[in-house]
Amino acid sequence: MTSGVLVRPEREGGPSKHFTARAGETRLGLVRRARQIHRILAERHPGARLQLRWGDPFQLLVAGVLAAQTTDERVNSVTPELFAAYPDAAALAGADPAGLEEMLRPVGYYRLKTEAVQKVARRLVSEHRGRVPRTLDALVAIPWVGRKTANMVLANAYGRPALTVDTHVGRLSARWGWTDAWDPADVEAEVVPLFPRRDWAPLADRATAHGRRICHSRKPACGACPLAALCPSYGVGETDPERAAGLVKS
């Protein structure tokens, strides 16, 4: 999972470079095709879920901040020790920064991320009695917490309808012709009206799984994709079935 929290996007505006429209498609046709895609994703990735490991809303929020510009696997490699040492916001807020930096070194940008998670913890203590708020507005008001992380917490920790737009969800939404936006907030605004609220959270998990396993950024496995007939971007990757099958990740 990646975020734009620590590094500015390369592009300042304009449509997604991955966007491919479906010629002549009506709004109703788009909605029907989007929901059909989601049904197939549910069949293909039935166990799709968030890859970050967490035990409570505080841990998930901190893990989400740490996941900026790194992989979930690297975050998961440090959080067991981190949360054993600092199990709540008060403990993390008062941690020695030098020791915390060493603990977070494997995730990259460790000095900046030490500052980030301690600012998050201090805000939770000073304004929310150490608890993670349950609304989007309150979450994004916390330093270093962007809309993506906030939606991730709402969807996974609190069971709220929310679409987490990570790099996979943004890229695939454009390839499927759902949006030509590149900014995650704009992608979210254009994609959520296509689906009932109950589908927002599972759609994010399933699209992320599909992006990791099949619809890769550089070389998607088009010839092994169950969405080939519904995808206006079919052909941007390998179309030969055997070679495409070799690109699919388990």
Image (cartoon, rainbow, N blue to C red):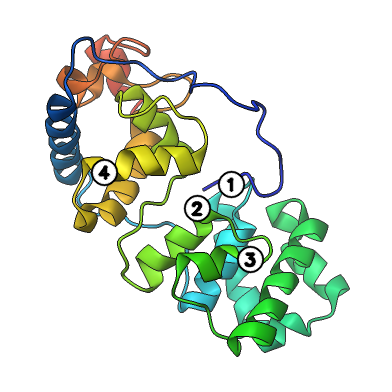
Q: x and y percent of residue 222 in the render?
A: 29, 18
Residue beneath disc 2: 148
Mark 4 belongs to which amino acid? Answer: Pro
Q: Residue at x 74, y 60 (%)?
A: 113
Location of the C terminus by quadrant is top left
SS under mark 4: helix
Residue beneath disc 3: 78
Asked whether the beta carbons under mark 2 and mark 1 sit within 8 Å of each other, the answer is yes
Separation of marks 2 and 1 at Cα, in angstroms: 8 Å
Q: How many marks?
A: 4
Mark 3 belongs to which amino acid? Answer: Val
Asked whether the beta carbons under mark 4 and mark 3 sit within 8 Å of each other, the answer is no
Residue 24 location, quadrant: top left
Mark 1 belongs to which amino acid? Answer: Ser
Q: x and y percent of residue 136 in the render?
A: 47, 65
Q: Nearer the viewer, mark 1 or mark 4?
A: 4
Label 3 packing within 10 angstroms: few (<14), some (14-19), many (20+)? some
Label placed on residue 193: 4
